Image (cartoon, rainbow, N blue to C red):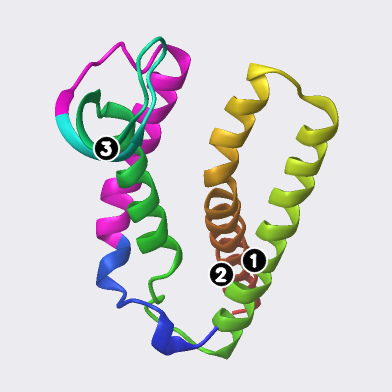
């Protein structure tokens, strides 16, 4: 992974400030209902199709944007956390980042394949919703775990 594609290290803190609250709020919303905290706004929609209403194309619609805001904060935060440089960015970190990303893609798609085989009905829509975020989540967890594990082994050698 080329260093020129990575963001400055200062964005990692901003990413965590977005990711942690978005994750907590997203879990609360998924356990309850997206209608539990209605934040209505008139938004431009390329396509809008609400239950028992006529589909609208390229129009303004009154929508609950709570899940939109949480999703945007989560994605932006996860991208900032995952793709910001470390304080000491070297070839080992670059290799670790690339292997973590590859591992995350493999695991995410294996989970998706299992979902295709064993989850049906409306539950599958939930699986697809969560699958949008799994690559970033798995990558961040795996990369930071490997960094932590490596820092422990380096400090043990000293």
Q: Quadrant of residue 27?
A: top left
Asked if residue 138 lies in the magenta stretch, the reply is no
Q: Which mark is residue 100?
A: 1
Q: How many numbered badges does the structure rendering display?
A: 3
Which callout, 3 or 1, points at the residue further toward the start of the chain?
A: 3
Q: Residue at x 32, y 45 (%)?
A: 72
Q: Nearer the viewer, mark 3 or mark 2?
A: 3
Query: In the rendered structure, which segment of residues is drawn in magenta?
Result: 13-41
Q: Residue 25 at what x, y percent from top left?
A: 34, 28
Which callout, 3 or 2, points at the residue further toward the start of the chain?
A: 3
Image vertical order of residue 136 relative to residue 36, above or below = below
In the image: residue 44, left or right of residue 75: left
Asked if residue 29 lies in the magenta stretch, the reply is yes
Q: Main secondary structure of the magenta part?
A: helix
- In this rendered view, identify the residue nearer to me: 146 or 35: 35
Quadrant in the picture for the N terminus: bottom right
Q: Nearer the viewer, mark 3 or mark 1?
A: 3
Q: Residue at x 30, y 11 (%)?
A: 36
Q: Quadrant of residue 78?
A: bottom left
Helix or strand or loop: what does disc 1 sit on?
Answer: helix
Question: Which residue is under mark 2?
Answer: 151
Query: Given contact means CB atoms under 8 Å apart, are the residues at marks 3 and 1 in contact?
Result: no
- In this rendered view, identify the residue nearer to me: 29 or 16: 29
Q: CA distance from mark 3 to mark 2?
A: 35 Å
Question: Which residue is under mark 3?
Answer: 69
Quadrant in the picture for the C terminus: bottom right
């Amino acid at each position: 992974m080329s260093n020129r594609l990575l963001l400055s290290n200062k964005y990692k803190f901003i990413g965590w400030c977005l990711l942690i609250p978005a994750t907590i709020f997203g879990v609360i919303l998924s356990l309850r209902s997206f209608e539990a905290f209605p934040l209505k706004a008139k938004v431009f929609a390329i396509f809008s199709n609400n239950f028992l209403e006529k589909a609208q194309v390229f129009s303004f619609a009154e929508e609950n944007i709570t899940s939109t805001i949480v999703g945007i904060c989560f994605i932006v935060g996860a991208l900032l956390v995952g793709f910001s440089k470390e304080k000491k960015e070297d070839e080992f970190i670059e290799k670790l980042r690339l292997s973590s990303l590859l591992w995350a893609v493999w695991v995410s798609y294996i989970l998706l394949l299992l979902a295709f085989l064993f989850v049906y009905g409306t539950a599958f829509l939930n699986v697809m919703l969560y699958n949008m975020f799994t690559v970033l989540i798995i990558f961040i967890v795996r990369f930071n775990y490997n960094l932590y594990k490596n820092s422990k082994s380096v400090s043990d050698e000293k």
